[in-house]
Image (spheres, helix red, strand yellow):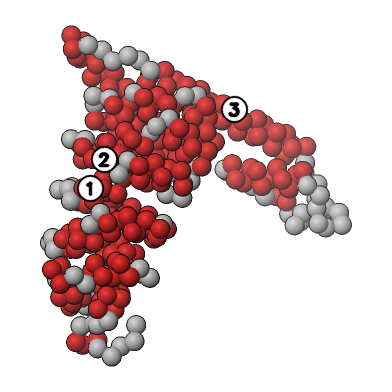
Amino acid sequence: MAEGRGNRPNPQNLQGLLRLAVEAGSASDEPAPTEPMSEERKAWLREALAEACRGQLDEVEQMRRCLDVLRRPERGEEEEGEEEEEGGAAESALDLLSELCENLDNARDLMTLGGLQLCVAQRLRDAAPGVRWRAAQLLAVCCQNHPEVQFHALSLGALSPLLALVDADPCPTVRVKALYAVSCLVREQEAALREFLSHDGFSVLMRGMQSDHEKLRVKSAFLLQSLLASHAEHRDTLVSMGMVQQLVSLLRCPPSPFHEHVLGALCCLVCDFPRGVTECRDPALGLEELLKERTRELKGREECQEELEFCERLLVSCFRSLPPEDNGMDR
């Protein structure tokens, strides 16, 4: 409503500024505004909009300067001290770019400026692990929920080096950040998923779940579950790879947060898929007893409710049974 508009405080953020601009430039639903915008307020609005535009240009200039830092050639061993200083500058530049590219417009601008190509071609292969993981993080931030940037990163061949980092980098943080970037590339992106399959990406996830690094295990299992939930057409491939047997073997490890996602992935492999059910029923796996034992352990633990539900769903789907205390319950 127009009433009282002139007495509102000036907006303190861009969202409020844009709302004010819309109000100033659009016709009111009321027959006539009771208090038109003052000349002073109009002047303030023009200045504020100009400042916002200048701020956007400033951010592009910041990205250009960061890329200048990242394009500097690596120094030789005889300049080791200076090389460490350059590595610190590269890490700072990547940190700033990641912060700026939370804005989707900046992510697109970075793509246009050649920033993603620089990350893929050079910085993912940097000698410093701090640079490698920050380059992977920047790719993840730019690609997340941004199809145009996803396609561009894919065209640059980003997926192959990222999967290689997940699989074999000596630094656990690099592996986790690279997996984050892989997830941002392949989820909700059919072309990227096809390339993921061509690089045997599911095997990479399995090896991630078998690693000694807890965070990598959790994130690998979560991505596997997510991909199976949205792409059931790949279940036959996974069962042929022996995925059921490998997932069950992971459930025999000491209890861990990643077990919830392992169980979720197993549920995806058996839901309306008789071949998956048959594999789970193999007596050599001992899955029925394992699920019953785990169900008893999880009873009454509110924080494990989803894991418990996965166990019970698998028992019903594969064995048509529940632990004795739940017999007769219709689930």
Disc 3 designates what residue? 54
Residue type at numbered disc 3 = Arg
Of mark 2 and mark 1, the one earlier in the sequence is 2
User: Where's residue 24, x and y in %?
Assistant: 75, 44
324 versus 130 height, above or below: below
User: Where's residue 270, x and y in %?
Assistant: 32, 68
CA distance for labels 3 and 2: 40 Å
Helix, strand or loop at label 1? It is helix
319 versus 70 height, above or below: below
| Residue 95 visible in rendering | no
Residue drawn at x 53%, y 38% as measured from the top left: 148
User: Where's residue 260, x and y in %?
Assistant: 26, 63
Of mark 3 and mark 2, the one earlier in the sequence is 3
Q: Nearer the viewer, mark 3 or mark 2?
A: 2
Q: Horizontally, is 112 left or right of 24 in the view?
A: left
Residue type at numbered disc 2 = Val
Helix, strand or loop at label 3? It is helix
Label 1, residues with CA under 10 Å away: few <14, some 14-19, many ≥20: many
Residue type at numbered disc 1 = Gly
Disc 2 designates what residue? 166
> Are the residues at dot 2 and dot 1 in contact (C-beta closer than 8 Å)?
yes
| Position of the N terminus by quadrant | bottom right
Disc 1 designates what residue? 208
Residue drawn at x 48%, y 29% as measured from the top left: 110
Residue drawn at x 24%, y 26% as measured from the top left: 128
User: Where's residue 97, x and y in %?
Assistant: 42, 31
Of mark 3 and mark 1, the one earlier in the sequence is 3
